[in-house]
């Protein structure tokens, strides 16, 4: 699996390419929509958990776009 990450002005995006066991290649563009706190609370991008979440927190991602790829890495 290869992954690259870029930051845009409005949200965090991550591009991930994966190969399935059957050989199919997929590219997913993931978009960060907020944060999940250790307490289970969800925080939006405009409302980060810094200073309010008692434990750790991690980004919450959604799939913004998915493409199946050919052998050369181009979308089908």
Image (cartoon, rainbow, N blue to C red):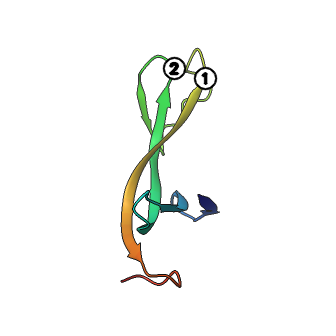
- 1 or 57, nearer to the observer: 1
- 55 or 21, nearer to the observer: 21
Q: Is residue 38 above or below residue 5?
A: above
Q: Which residue is mark 1?
A: 56
Q: Residue at x 57, y 64 (%)?
A: 9
* Place of residue 54 in the rendered image (x, y in percent of width and height, measured from the top left): 58, 14
Q: Which residue is mark 2?
A: 38
> Separation of disc 2 and disc 1 at Cα?
5 Å
Q: Which image quadrant is residue 15 in?
A: bottom right
- 50 or 21, nearer to the observer: 21
The disc label shown at residue 29, or none: none
* Place of residue 60 in the rendered image (x, y in percent of width and height, measured from the top left): 46, 41
* Place of residue 22 in the rendered image (x, y in percent of width and height, measured from the top left): 39, 62
Q: Residues within 10 Å of mark 1 (few under 14, many from 20)?
A: few
Q: Are marks 2 and 1 in contact (CB under 8 Å)?
A: yes
Q: Is residue 43 above or below residue 10?
A: above
Q: Which image quadrant is residue 21 in?
A: bottom left
- 36 or 70, nearer to the observer: 70
Q: Residues within 10 Å of mark 2 (few under 14, many from 20)?
A: few
Q: Is residue 36 above or below residue 45?
A: above
Q: Which image quadrant is residue 76 in?
A: bottom left
Regarding mark 1 in the picture, which secondary structure is present there? loop
* Place of residue 59 in the rendered image (x, y in percent of width and height, measured from the top left): 52, 40
Quadrant position of the N terminus in the picture: bottom right
Residue 37 lies left or right of residue 3; in this view the side is left
Residue 47 lies left or right of residue 9; in this view the side is left
Regarding mark 2 in the picture, which secondary structure is present there? loop
Q: Residue at x 55, y 59 (%)?
A: 14
Q: Which badge, 2 or 1, comes first in the chain's sequence?
A: 2
């Amino acid at each position: 699996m290869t992954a690259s990450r870029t930051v845009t002005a409005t949200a965090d995006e991550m591009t991930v390419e994966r190969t399935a066991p059957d050989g199919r290649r997929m590219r997913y563009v993931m978009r960060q929509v907020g944060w999940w706190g250790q307490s289970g609370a969800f925080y939006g991008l405009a409302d980060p958990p810094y200073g309010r979440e008692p434990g750790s927190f991690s980004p919450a991602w959604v799939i913004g776009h998915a493409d199946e790829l050919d052998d050369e890495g181009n979308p089908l």
